[in-house]
Image (tube, rainbow, N blue to C red):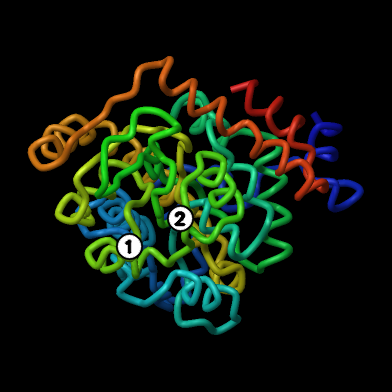
Amino acid sequence: MKRIIALALSLVTVMSLAACGGKTSGGDNSAAASSGSGDGKVYKITYANTVADSNPQAINAKYMADRMKELSNGRIEMTVFNNNKLGAFSDCFQQMQQPNGTVQMGDVSSASVTQFSDLYTPFALPFLFSSKEQSFDYFDNGETVKAIEDQFLKDTNVRVLGYFYNDARALTNSKHAVATPADCAGLKLRVMTSDVYIKTFEALNAAPVSMQFSELFSALQQGAVDGQDNGLILSMDSKFNEVQGYYTDLGHVQDTSVIFISEAFYQSLPEDLQQVVVQAAQEAVAKERQDYADKLDSYLDEMKKTMDVTILTDDQRAAFKDACQPVYDWYRGQYPQYDLDAIMADIANY
């Protein structure tokens, strides 16, 4: 497996296979709460994300804050700002990179992380995972993703704590139903700032447009773009059904939202409070994934009241996957520093 990781990243000669410290076990509740330095200092955290208040990610970011306060006996106070209230996430991430930044934590789709580092580009590839369960197992336990986290920390001074589920990405648009790759031709689709996403929709003969999520609703409303690709729950919570007429459960990416913490802030915490942060994040991830599963059916029923919904058959989805294969060839040429075959082999173990 060490050979796989070296091939997969080939950024340094030897990379640790240990998980990023933010994902190690936090221990039991009593140990986390009682083993502190006793300095009495209260540590305040500002947490930023992009989703609406009703989204499972937003709900469980607040749950994470509550657990931090409980486990630390009030020594950690985290305030959560949802729905881009602190501005574009790229600006919030830059604050996390600063020793005294105004934002200490947050989460955003792994595809958006490619704005800050190329390391997460493989996970934007279309149809890379066969199921959400496979993606959960890989992101929690995969050797190559652990090595990516280590290098990401070195490159950005931001630590990865875990991965919320961000739903299977789907397609909405205002023009017509999409059931085949040919139906994508000419659609002007908003995508995240990601070369892989752009290439994916170019392979489907659409016209992708990079845009911050905070600008998306108005762009859809004004017709600046025809559609977008986000998960079912995020699309409904963002009220895209009010400005879109057609939905397709494309499932081209089993998306994750990466939970970050400023490394400078993390290292400023006493060791027992570091454990509290880790444990609270782990608990929030487990709860958020279950919340997503519990909500999907009811959200789909609600969407059907206002939108034309297309549920792809296995054969139809396979046609989209086949159409996207040139993206893999492009990726290998564009990012030769990553051994994509080794990463895919690691994913196949889960």
Tell me the quarter of the image containing the C terminus: top right
- The reply to whether residue 350 is visible in this rendering is yes
Name the residue nearer the viewer: 341 or 179: 179
* Residue 345, quarter of the rendered image: top right
Relative to 279, residue 314 above or below? above
User: Residue under circle 1?
Assistant: 69
Label 2–label 1 contact, CB within 8 A: no
Whether residue 299 sits left or right of residue 253 in the image: it is: left
Q: CA distance from mark 2 to mark 1?
A: 37 Å
* Residue 155, quarter of the rendered image: bottom right
Residue 83 image offset from top left, x and y in percent: 29, 66
Residue 146 image offset from top left, x and y in percent: 67, 43
Q: Residue at x 76, y 50 (%)?
A: 334
* Residue 251, quarter of the rendered image: top left
Looking at the image, the residue that sits furthest to the left is: 305
Indicate the amino acid at tag 1. Lys
Residue 3 image offset from top left, x and y in percent: 86, 32
Nearer the observer: mark 2 or 1; the answer is 2
Q: Residue at x 56, y 56 (%)?
A: 194
Instruction: Tell me which numbered mark, 2 or 1, is placed earlier along the sequence.
Output: 1
Q: Secondary structure at mark 2?
A: strand
Relative to 215, residue 26 above or below? above
- The reply to whether residue 291 is visible in this rendering is no
Indicate the amino acid at tag 2. Val
User: Residue under circle 2?
Assistant: 191
Whether residue 256 sits left or right of residue 85 in the image: it is: right
Badge 2 crowding class, 10 Å Cα cut-off, few under 14, some 14 to 19, many 20 or more, is: many
